[in-house]
Amino acid sequence: MVNDTSPPAFPSGSATHDIPGMSLRDWFAGQALTGVITLSKNDTAALKDRAVYIAEACYQIADAMLAERAKS
């Protein structure tokens, strides 16, 4: 697993509990995955055959989004 230093996507906290939530990188990757699945047109066999490739691609998209975000 990559050392994820992105900020939390949905942070919450109180005086007694800090709940960092999922990382922004994971959130971006999940959003990319939603798009990939939508484009698959219900071809579940193709999704299963390419699961590792799809997961890697979604995290590459997430990393690109974080890099672009850091520019501003």
Image (tube, grey):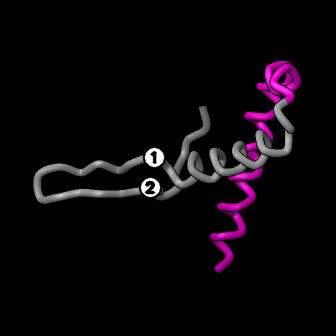
Return the residue nearer the eye: 14 or 46: 46
Quadrant containing the N terminus in the rendered view: top right
**Mark 1 highlights which residue?**
22
Assess disc 1: are there few (<14), some (14-19) or many (≥20) residues with their C-alpha within 10 Å of its C-alpha.
Answer: some
13 shown above or below 72: above
Q: At 85% across and 44% down in the image, what residue appears?
A: 39
Q: Quadrant of the C terminus?
A: bottom right
* x and y percentages locating residue 66 in the rendered image: 65, 61
- Magenta segment: 43-72
- Amino acid at circle 1: Met
**Type of residue at label 2?**
Pro
- Upstream in sequence: badge 2 or badge 1: 2
Principal secondary structure, stretch drawn in magenta: helix
Quarter of the figure with residue 10: bottom left
Q: Number of numbered discs present?
A: 2
Identified at 57% across, 50% down, the residue is 27
Q: Secondary structure at mark 2?
A: loop
Gap between marks 2 and 1 measured at Cα = 6 Å
The residue most toward the left is 16
Q: Nearer the viewer, residue 45 or 7?
A: 45
Residue drawn at x 82%, y 32% is 42
Reply above or below: 14 against 53.
below
Residue sticking out furthest to the front: 42
Q: Give coordinates of residue 47: x percent, y percent.
A: 82, 27
> Is residue 70 toward the left or the right of residue 18 in the image?
right
Q: Is residue 52 magenta?
A: yes
Task: Depth check: give the residue in front, 48 or 10.
Answer: 48
Please say if the residues under marks 2 and 1 sit with CB atoms less than 8 Å apart.
yes
Is 30 displayed left or right of 20 in the figure? right
| Label annotation for residue 8 | 2
Left or right: residue 18 compared with residue 5: left
